[in-house]
Amino acid sequence: MTIPTEFDEIRPYLPEELPAVYEELIADPEFQTAMGYAFKQIPFEQIAAMMRGSKTNLDFQKALVAPFLQGLLSKFSSGISMSYENRESLKAALCISNHRDIILDSAFLCLLMIEQVGNTVEIAIGDNLLIRPWIKKLVRVNRSFIVQRSASIREMLASSKRLSSYIHHTITERQQPIWIAQREGRAKDSNDATQEGLIKMLSMYSNGEILDALKVLNIAPTTISYEFDPCDYLKAKEFQQKRDNPGHKKSPMDDLINMQAGLFGYKGAIHYHVAEVINDKIDALDRNMTKNEKTAAVARLIDHEIHKNYRLWPVNYYFYELLTGDTQFADKYTAEDKERLDAYLADRIAKVDLAEKDDTFLRGKILEMYANPLINYMKAHA
């Protein structure tokens, strides 16, 4: 199926474009170095041959991306699992998920879908992360489309309309599922909430009733649960930096450090849950609400589905108790768990490298990160 040329700047590469892009990547010294780091046991000539043998984006993902992710899981996790309420809905759904890891949230979903559905999602990625030319090429090979975040206000409006139209075209015309985070940037305190601006953007392709426009996209709220967040101490560090200097902003190097920690840090158990498409719930909303009220209502529907489907572990229950003093979940962890988690908490605080380090503040922030999913889970099931 032909994709309109208006999307050429942001869409993934088409299969017929891949051979030329492969050769550009293969000739790039930075790409060669990155592949040498990712695949230490495989000569680069073999990687190049695997790329040239991949005729489609999915072929590339199966040949190179999936083995890399499986290697990460074997070294840095205790296993990954997935559940879903309707397998059929995955075939042309907009999976809106909470956001924990810059790279792996969508990557692991693709790996699970290769294994269980035989397809992968297209991935929304912010242009702020595409800090090198080879990275931009690589993500577009890997079925990513680009969300422009560095444009002027006037440019952003046109960019948002184009992005909305691209998402609508991809789901309705090409029957291709998409993943997008519920907010710009990660929820660093794990208090997951869908940005209403995202909902407005998704509906911009249509001038009609916003609820009808959103229903067409087949929104399937997706919950990502990591037992441990390898970036928890970096997120706590950033909280203190912003507390001490409200104008603090992360640098591109900070993003790279977070990406590296997320990739090569221990995650424990990982679980994904894809809820049923929420069209029936959208139908139940009051059509007499204002547009802003409808936007907020749909965002809260997504939040509710994400919150009620968390997979929780002893760290969530024990750190909730340490944060709140509430002992109602004391049966959810053992004495051995407590000893292990106390050591984990002390180690994470020790990893924060700040000159004026506030251990008490950092401890509270890390406890919040693990307690908030449980707090929101309880509210969703109340």
Image (spheres, helix red, strand yellow):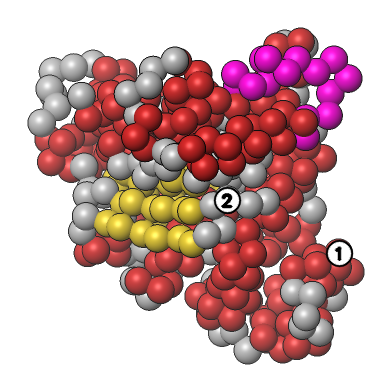
Q: Amino acid at mark 1?
A: Glu
- In the image, residue 181 lies at what x, y percent? 47, 42
Kind of element beneath mark 1: helix
Q: Residue at x 75, y 88 (%)?
A: 46
Horizontal arrangement in the rendering, residue 122 relative to residue 35 (left or right): left
Viewer can see residue 98: no
Q: Which callout, 1 or 2, points to the residue nearer the camera?
A: 2
Instruction: Please give the range of residues in magenta.
Output: 351-365
* Residue 361 on the magenta segment: yes
Query: Residue pushed farthest front?
Result: 335
Q: Nearer the viewer, residue 230 or 222?
A: 230
Asked if residue 80 is positioned above or below residue 316 in the image, the reply reads below
Horizontal arrangement in the rendering, residue 226 relative to residue 42 (left or right): left
Asked if residue 249 is positioned above or below residue 97 in the image, the reply reads above
- In the image, residue 267 lies at what x, y percent? 57, 50
Q: Which residue is tagged 2?
A: 267
- In the image, residue 277 lies at what x, y percent? 23, 48
Horizontal arrangement in the rendering, residue 349 relative to residue 192 (left or right): right
Q: Amino acid at mark 2?
A: Lys
Q: Residue at x 45, y 23 (%)?
A: 321
- In the image, residue 69 lies at what x, y percent? 59, 66
Q: Which residue is tagged 1?
A: 30
* Residue 133 on the magenta segment: no
Horizontal arrangement in the rendering, residue 192 relative to residue 62 (left or right): left
Kind of element beneath mark 2: loop
Q: Nearer the viewer, residue 117 or 58?
A: 117
